[in-house]
Amino acid sequence: MEKLNVCLMNDSFPPAIDGVANAVTNYARVISDRLGRASVVTPYYPEADDSAFPFPVLRYPSLDVMKLVGYRAGLPFDAETMGRMEKQRFDIIHSHCPISSTVLARALRDRIDVPVVLTYHTKFDIDIANAVRGEFLREEAARFLVRNIAACDEVWTVSRGAGDNLRKLGYEGDYIVMPNGVDLPRGRVGDDAIEKAVTGYDLPAGVPVFLFVGRMMWYKGARITLDALKKLDAAGQDFRMVFVGSGADREEIMAYSSSLGLDGKVLFAPAIRDREVIRAWYCRADLFLFPSTFDTNGLVVREAAACGLGSVLVAGSCAAEDVTDGVNGILMEENAGSMAEKLTAVCADLGLARRIGGNAQRDLYISWEDAVKNAYERYGTVIDNYRRGLYQEHDRLTDGLLHGLASAMDGVNRGRERYRHMQEEITSGVEEVRESLADGFGDLREELTDGLEELKDGLSDGAHHLKDRLEELGKKMER
């Protein structure tokens, strides 16, 4: 297989933590370790430390909009960043976000003439609805998004449901389903690791433990989960529910749990970056509760499956794709009553939960190594199609604007390069003058030194001669 040089772009990347940032990290890791070369291009974060990554990370200017959308917004029209990217000689550009990253990807394509692939990970209609006020502005934002996506050479989605969401947004082009993987190995951790990870949390033996791992946002289905648990509590069923993660709605979710009287049974742990500790939590739980219809892939469901933990999912959701109810997962309707009914049945038979977890490990698990290998093989096809002219021409208005901006950034970079050469020439000229003056002063110093030595010798000879003459005169006067 030909070794490719891949440019990976995304609007989020560590220290920002989400499923897409995790996907890009693993794409870069697997490609760099086993297949070719990869670089990540992502917005600047003031607390970022990229030194630990075994691949290059190029940061470009960003704007702090954390309070609005929870991320820093990339500012893609930066000439210095474009100049650095052009020098990398990339074979293909793979964007994982259809906003700033894809704008930058298209501008770079204009400069280096290689194809752009976009992976659609997230239901952006929900993000737009949360971030944009007013129906007109939302429609315009959706149209911009679709135009940006359609301008890519090939579009991938992480699930069939993600493709359906693209159609809902108004995208009419083709796409390929390219699932993500998980970075946890298949199998369980030891009892000692589990005990260490859960120390300090009240998890009595024999009491069912339910788990959620991810961003603490209402759209992940947290209200359905808490309302269902309230029903279990009211029915006298003992349990423990652990939410692991951080997010903009965390404080509200904790307050709502407390208002339901679930303190002591519903526990909250902070976001955990240590993947072995996350594995331990998956291995300790009896069921993973994920009633989200927002997520397009639900990587956490496959992470849980890697550890032999089955999930409770909304039937028809993207996260429930490839799940058979009662076999490798549990499917529910999108309401608290349905979840409560499913959990009650499992609490009466924890052996069922273990059997479902084992089947999930067998059926749902896919490693990042396998997922990225599949994508990497497709890169070769995309590059070949692009070179053969099989993709549509990019002659829309936005492409013309991007061409102008890319050309302007190139002009800035060429101006900078000329200025740098001028500085080098001036520095070199000054250095030559300095060396010439230094040589001249050196020669003058040597001549002065020699002259002074000659003068010194002459004065010394003259003094001796005068002394001899005085002595002779003295002798004559004595006579």
Image: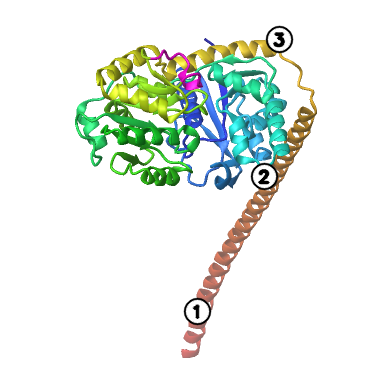
Mark-to-mark CA distance, 1 and 2: 63 Å
Marks 1 and 3, Cα distance to the nearest angstrom? 104 Å
Q: Earlier in the sequence, mark 1 or mark 3?
A: 3
Whether residue 129 is visible to the viewer of this picture, yes or no, is yes
Q: Assess whether mark 3 and mark 1 are in contact (beta carbons under 8 angstroms).
A: no
What residue is shown at x 41% (from left), y 21% (from top)?
Answer: 302
In the image, taking residue 173 as reference, residue 329 lies left or right, namely: left
Which mark is on residue 157?
none
Task: Name the residue that disc number 2 marks.
Answer: 424
Instruction: Single out the mark in the foreground, 1 or 2.
Output: 2
Q: Nearer the viewer, residue 117 or 235?
A: 235
User: Closer to the camera: disc 2 or disc 3?
Assistant: 3
Q: Is residue 106 left or right of residue 300?
A: right
Q: Residues within 10 Å of mark 1 (few under 14, many from 20)?
A: few
Q: Residue furthest front?
A: 235
Where residue 425 appears, as percent x and y from the top left, is: 70, 44
Pointer 1 or 2: first along the chain:
2
| Distance from the alpha carbon under mark 2 to that under mark 3 | 43 Å
| Secondary-structure class at tag 2 | helix
- Residue, disc 1: 467
In this rendering, would 115 be left or right of 368? Answer: right
Looking at marks 2 and 3 on the same chain, the residue that comes earlier in the sequence is marked by: 3
Write the start and end of the magenta stretch as one range.
315-325
Residue that badge 3 annotates? 388
SS for callout 3 = loop
